[in-house]
Amino acid sequence: MQVVTWNVNSLRARLDHLLRFLDEESPDVVCLQELKLSDNQFPHERIRDAGYPHLEWWGEKNYNGVALLSKHPIEDPQRGHCDGGDDSQARLIAGTVKGVRVIGVYAPNGTRLGSERFAFKLAWYDRLFEMIDGRYTPEDALVLCGDLNIAPDDPDVWDPFKCDGILLCHPLERERFQRFIDWGFTDPYRDRNPFANDFSWWDYQQMGWQRNHGMRIDHTLITPTLDARCTDVQIHADVRGWKTASDHAPVSVTFD
């Protein structure tokens, strides 16, 4: 069973890229972020024709938006934190596939340190942790994946000195990420590639892709139950090199 997360940065602009990836890689489950289209604009027919008949999506015009695509039935679908708080932004979608609970998220960027949006990001993460801690245990088969908008450590950025303390690398953000690891999640990519300096996002500006000035901010966190069955985890960096590609590459994790 292969689960993929991918921030497509506009599904309307990247639909052909998605269909190509589905054809070439054929994952079981795909979590998409940043759809940038409303619910009624979601291209469900073309995706079903590509072999993914089971779909859950939550669109938002021009911003955000998340989706689950699956070859297998999706049980207990969920939109948002469902904690009584503000869930007006389409940033979280979840479902259970073949006994595995998959939570796909598009975490807030934060925009600028010290801003209201940065405070919103931290609070959003706190809500996410409380939701997971209140509903699940590390013994559950759980995948938390998506564009988490946090580079958790120095090997996850192109230059740890220039990136030290900036947005996506700030100690308060990294503390939120570490909280999930302390709870029981593992980071299978880092665990299996302890010294790798690999990235999942490269800025469009200043030739970020061409200069390999990137960050690893797209993650597939898994519980120990799944980690014991994990046979592969990879960043599909070649996809970032496709013509008119998203600035994010897909990340996949595979279980026996």
Image: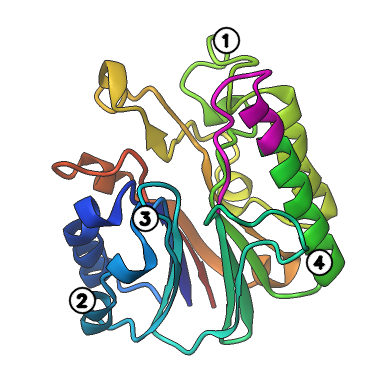
Q: Which badge, 1 or 4, is on the more N-terminal residue?
A: 4
Circle 2 packing at 10 Å, graded few (<14), some (14-19), many (20+), is some
Residue 58 painted magenta: no
Q: Which kind of residue does numbered mark 4 sit on?
A: Pro
Circle 3 residue = 35
What label sits on residue 161 in the rendered view? 1
In x, y percent, where is residue 51? 27, 83
- Label whose residue precedes the other's in the sequence (1 or 2): 2
The answer to whether residue 173 is above or below residue 193 is above
Tell me residue 158's x, y (percent).
46, 22
Q: Which mark is residue 46?
A: 2
Mark found first going from the N terminus, 3 or 2: 3
What secondary structure is marked by label 1?
Answer: loop
Measure the alpha-carbon separation of dots 1 and 3: 33 Å
Q: Which numbered disc flags the more N-terminal residue, 4 or 3?
A: 3
Mark 4 and mark 3: Cα distance apart in space: 30 Å
Tag 4 residue: 138
Above or below, 246 against 115 in this view is below
Residue 251 visible in rendering: no
Q: Nearer the viewer, residue 143 or 13?
A: 13
Label 3 and label 2: CA atoms lie apart by 15 Å
Q: Residue at x 20, y 76 (%)?
A: 46
Q: Magenta segment, which residues?
A: 104-120
Q: Nearer the viewer, residue 43 or 30?
A: 43
Q: x, y percentage for residue 169?
A: 62, 25
> Which label number is shown at residue 178?
none
User: Along the horizontal axis of the image, is 101 left or right of 248?
Assistant: right
10 Å neighbourhood of mark 4: few (<14), some, or many (≥20)?
A: some
Q: Which amino acid type corresponds to the residue marked 3 in the rendered image? A: Leu
Q: Earlier in the sequence, mark 1 or mark 3?
A: 3
Which callout, 1 or 2, points to the residue nearer the camera? 2
